Image (cartoon, rainbow, N blue to C red):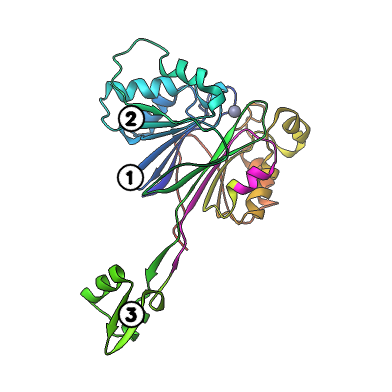
């Protein structure tokens, strides 16, 4: 199962309808919690997500709307006796803020939190899920965006298997050995399989347009990206280090993104959901989701 559980969508301050940021990516057995702002623990309750669903924490930066939920989430994991480790990634320059959030109040500390701060661009973790990479973005303080890249694999094509008369246990043998002999002919794995493209997920917060935004979004099946402003306030976006909905959609179009998830909205546009969508649709023809709290958005099925 691969889906995004949206826990919050507000930048800077929560509103009556939007909690601070918070996004749980469920990616097979992996649960990656991105940027838990204030109130994330409660949003997880409302979304029906247990603390035990989180085994990785990715913080883009240490402005409050992206990290004030860390104490609640960690203390809840401790209270619930979550037994697996929780690996935390964040910009290394914010280590002092992470340490404070990690130990923000008195509690019976049973959580196994392993800090692995991000030092520089590149891979930060690898596992069955693929490779988690970070890229520095362009904001008023250090920000890292993330992407999850599943390596390409191969899948069997049933018509080709039957054309070569391969069936039953022979398929497993071919998969293990890379080749098989059938009726005196050696058949290579590549002859009966096709490339199964790995899926990609990208997470881009609090940044002006820069090369790293495009590198993160490149070929993403799902791109979650901040659209703090509408294009009418492009000057403010530039000044404060943010994106507009049109800029975010332009990135999605340039990078071949499939599902574009806009979020991190300024409270200045209270009823602007339609305008975000319209503006994005002018630049991007793929799937556009203007995120709402507690939405569940499936990662699009493999092509
Ligand atoms: Zn923010």
**Rendered residue at 66%/51% (across/down):** 281
The answer to whether 161 is drawn above or below residue 70 in the figure is: below
> Residue 161's mark?
3
- Is residue 155 found left or right of 260 in the rendered image? left
Q: Is residue 57 magenta?
A: no
Question: Residues under labels 2 and 1: Cα distance?
Answer: 14 Å
Of callouts 2 and 1, the N-terminal one: 1
- Is residue 210 found left or right of 71 in the rendered image? right
Of callouts 3 and 1, the N-terminal one: 1
Quickly name the residue at label 1.
Answer: 29
Split into quadrants, the picture shows ligand 1 in the one at top right
**Rendered residue at 44%/58% (across/down):** 301
Question: Which residue ends up furthest to the right in the rendered image?
Answer: 235
The answer to whether 117 is drawn above or below residue 195 in the figure is: above
* Front position in the image: 65 or 287: 65
Kindly report which numbered mark, 2 or 3, lies closer to the viewer in this rendering: 3
- In terms of secondary structure, where does tag 1 sit? loop
Quickly name the residue at label 2.
Answer: 51
Q: How far from the left and from the top, in percent, is residue 207?
A: 65, 35
Is the distance from the Cβ of mark 1 to the nearest ligand 1 atom less than 8 Å? no
* Front position in the image: 92 or 65: 92
**Rendered residue at 37%/81% (across/down):** 160
Q: Which residues are magenta?
A: 195-215
């Amino acid at each position: 199962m691969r889906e995004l559980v949206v826990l919050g969508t507000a930048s800077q301050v929560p509103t009556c309808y939007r909690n601070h940021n918070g996004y749980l990516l469920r990616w097979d057995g992996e649960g990656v919690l991105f940027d838990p702002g204030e109130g994330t623990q409660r949003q997880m309750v409302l979304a029906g997500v247990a603390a035990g669903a989180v085994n990785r924490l990715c913080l883009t930066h240490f402005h409050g709307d992206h990290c004030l939920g860390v104490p609640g989430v960690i203390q809840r994991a401790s209270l619930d006796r979550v037994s697996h480790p929780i690996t935390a990634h964040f910009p290394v320059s914010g280590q002092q803020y992470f340490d404070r959030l990690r130990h923000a109040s008195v509690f019976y500390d049973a959580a196994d939190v392993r800090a692995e701060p991000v030092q520089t661009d590149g891979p930060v973790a690898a596992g069955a899920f693929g490779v988690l990479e970070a890229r520095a973005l362009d904001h008023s303080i250090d920000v890292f965006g993330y992407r999850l890249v599943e390596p390409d694999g191969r899948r069997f094509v049933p018509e080709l298997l039957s054309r070569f008369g391969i069936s039953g246990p022979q398929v497993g043998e071919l998969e293990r050995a890379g080749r098989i002999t059938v009726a005196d002919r050696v058949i290579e794995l590549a002859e009966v399989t096709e490339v199964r493209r790995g899926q990609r997920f990208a997470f881009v917060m609090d940044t002006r347009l820069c090369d790293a935004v495009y590198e993160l979004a490149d070929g993403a099946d799902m791109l979650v990206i901040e659209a703090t402003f509408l294009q009418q306030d492009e000057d403010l976006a530039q000044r404060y280090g943010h994106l507009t909905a049109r800029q975010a959609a332009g990135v999605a179009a340039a990078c071949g993104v499939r599902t574009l998830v806009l979020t991190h909205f300024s409270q200045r546009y209270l009823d602007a959901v339609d305008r975000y969508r319209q503006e994005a649709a002018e630049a991007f023809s793929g799937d556009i989701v203007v995120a709402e709290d507690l939405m569940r958005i499936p990662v699009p099925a493999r092509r």
